Image (cartoon, grey):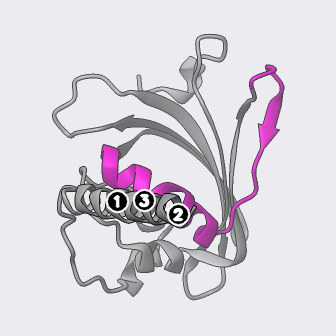
C-alpha cells in the first residue's frame, strides 16, 4: 500500500513540474508603467475616445486598467447583453473591476482592437446618452471585424469632468443586424 502511495505521489509531483514548465513557455507580456491622464475626461468626446483607446491593444499587451477605472463613477456598471443557449436575452451587471477580471486574459491572448465607427449623442443638462457603434479586430491589419455592436453609454458631467455611469451593449448577429441609422454613411 505504501509503495502505491509513493508512486502516486511521485507521479503527481512530476506531472505538476511538467505543467509548470509549460506555463513558463507562454508568450511574454509587455509590461508598461501606466499613469492616469486626467485630461482624458474633460470633454464628452475625449472620454469616449479614451474608453476605446484603453480597451484596444494587440495580443500580449496589457491595458492601462488604471485609466479604465478612472473613467467610471463609483458604482458604475458595464452591462453586456445577448442570447443564452436557449435563445433568451440575458444581461450581466459588472463593475469595472469585474469586467477587468473577466476580460484581461482573453484580451492578452487574442488581441482586441475596438474602433468607434458611428455615434449618436443626446445631451440634456449634465447627462448624456451616446449610442456608439463599434467594430472589433484581433489585429490592426485585419480587413474585416470579427465583431460589431452598439454601446449605449450613459455619462454624467459634474462641473469638472465627464464620468461614465453605464456601458450597456449588444453584439450584432445574423438575426439582429445594426440598423443603417447607426452605421457610417
**Image-quadrant location for residue 147:** top left
1 vs 3, front mark: 3
**Residue at the (18%, 68%) spot, across then down:** 30
Tell me if mark 1 has few (under 14), some (14-19) or many (20+) residues whose alpha carbon lies within 10 angstroms of its own: some
Q: CA distance from mark 3 to mark 2?
A: 5 Å
Could you say which is closer to the camera, residue 35 or residue 50?
35
Return the disc, 1 or 3, that comes first in the chain's sequence: 3
Could you say which is closer to the camera, residue 158 or residue 56?
56
Q: Position of residue 181 (x, y in %)?
A: 57, 24
Which residue lies most toward the top here? 174
Tell me if mark 3 has few (under 14), some (14-19) or many (20+) residues whose alpha carbon lies within 10 angstroms of its own: few
- Asked whether the beta carbons under mark 1 and mark 2 sit within 8 Å of each other, the answer is no
Q: Secondary structure at mark 3?
A: helix
Q: Which residues are magenta?
A: 85-111
184 to the left or right of 102: left
**Residue at the (21%, 75%) spot, across then down:** 31
Amino acid at each position: 500500500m505504501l509503495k502505491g502511495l509513493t508512486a502516486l505521489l511521485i507521479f503527481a509531483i512530476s506531472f505538476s513540474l511538467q505543467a509548470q514548465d509549460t506555463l513558463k513557455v507562454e508568450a511574454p507580456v509587455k509590461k508598461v508603467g501606466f499613469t492616469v491622464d486626467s485630461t482624458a475626461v474633460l470633454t464628452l468626446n475625449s472620454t469616449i475616445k479614451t474608453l476605446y483607446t484603453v480597451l484596444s491593444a494587440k495580443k500580449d499587451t496589457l491595458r492601462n486598467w488604471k485609466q479604465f477605472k478612472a473613467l467610471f463613477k463609483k458604482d458604475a456598471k458595464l452591462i453586456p447583453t445577448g442570447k443564452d443557449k436557449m435563445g433568451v436575452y440575458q444581461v450581466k451587471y459588472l463593475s469595472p473591476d469585474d469586467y477587468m477580471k473577466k476580460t484581461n486574459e482573453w484580451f492578452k491572448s487574442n488581441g482586441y482592437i475596438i474602433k468607434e465607427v458611428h455615434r449618436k449623442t443626446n445631451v440634456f443638462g449634465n447627462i448624456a446618452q451616446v449610442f456608439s457603434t463599434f467594430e472589433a479586430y484581433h489585429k490592426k491589419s485585419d480587413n474585416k471585424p470579427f465583431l460589431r455592436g452598439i454601446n449605449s453609454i450613459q455619462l454624467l458631467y459634474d462641473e469638472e469632468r465627464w464620468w461614465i455611469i453605464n456601458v450597456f451593449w449588444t453584439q450584432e448577429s445574423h438575426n439582429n443586424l445594426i440598423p443603417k441609422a447607426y452605421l457610417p454613411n
